[in-house]
Image: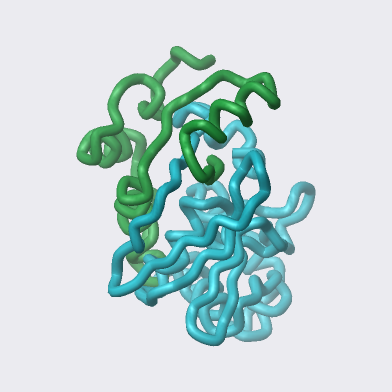
Chain colours: A green, B cyan
Amino acid sequence: MLLFRSEETIDRWCEAQGVARRPTVSLEQLWRLAVTWYENRLTPESRRPAPDEMVGIFSAIGLTGPFWDPKSDQWS
Amino acid sequence: MDFETTVKLRLYRTIAETTRVPDAAELARALDASTDRVKEAFRTLSGRRLLVLEPGTASRIRMAPPFSAVETPFLVRVGEKAYYANCVWDALGVSAALHRDARVLASDGHTGEPLDLEVRGGKPVARPCAIHFAVPAARWWDDIIHT
């Protein structure tokens, strides 16, 4: 994922790269993901969320649908 | 505590303290273990998607998320130390993992203009920006270095 100044520069980047426009997240949403993924990373218990857990984590911050489902077969 | 967990903890604590990602030989010396045993632990942790190894070797780590072993466009300053992160998500993740405020020296993905972020008081300082996910979650690990 990449950081952009605005939605407008994302549009310009997608056009220049010839790639599809995909979802964006806000800084606040990304911070929630960063905390969920990494706040325990320096502890013995740390682990990566399982796919079903990931769906719940994304949904809790408003990211829903097949794009955010690690088990979706829509993209295969 | 099993050996993989011991390796993981020593790995991450070494990164936190030194800002460098150690290789298998360095960790083996620190843990008084064989390099082969540490490499096997690296493979196990890689299988759990907790590490990304350099292609073709179990001796060296490319990513110990959120930290990167190589220079990236995401430099994270925490106090007097500076860490490279794998992406903007991981850049904030360095702050979250270390439980420290941080400044992320990044740039706009299209224009290249400086676009710094800051975590202060345990939360990001609001600023105009957006994060674009080009790859769906189901494909993130097809090529995690690209993602």
Residue B76 in the image: state x and y as whole percent: 55, 68
- Figure check: B32 above or below B118: below
> Residue at the location (71% across, 62% down)?
B71
Taking depth in this image into account, of B36 and A23 the one nearest to the observer is A23
- Figure check: B136 above or below B66: above
> Residue at the location (64% across, 67% down)?
B37
Q: Residue furthest left?
A: A60
Is residue A47 in view from this perspective? no
Residue B9 in the image: state x and y as whole percent: 47, 73
Residue B95 in the image: state x and y as whole percent: 42, 68
Q: Quadrant of residue A67?
A: top left
- Figure check: A6 above or below B99: above
- Figure check: B143 above or below B84: above
Residue B33 in the image: state x and y as whole percent: 63, 79
Q: Is residue A56 left or right of residue B99?
A: left
> Residue at the location (54% across, 74% down)?
B77
Q: Is residue B69 left or right of residue A65?
A: right
Q: Residue furthest right?
A: B56
Is residue A25 in view from this perspective? yes
Q: Quadrant of residue B93?
A: bottom left
Taking depth in this image into account, of A9 and A25 the one nearest to the observer is A9
Taking depth in this image into account, of B34 and B50 the one nearest to the observer is B50
Tally the marks: 0
> Residue at the location (60% across, 83% down)?
B18
Taking depth in this image into account, of A19 and B27 the one nearest to the observer is A19
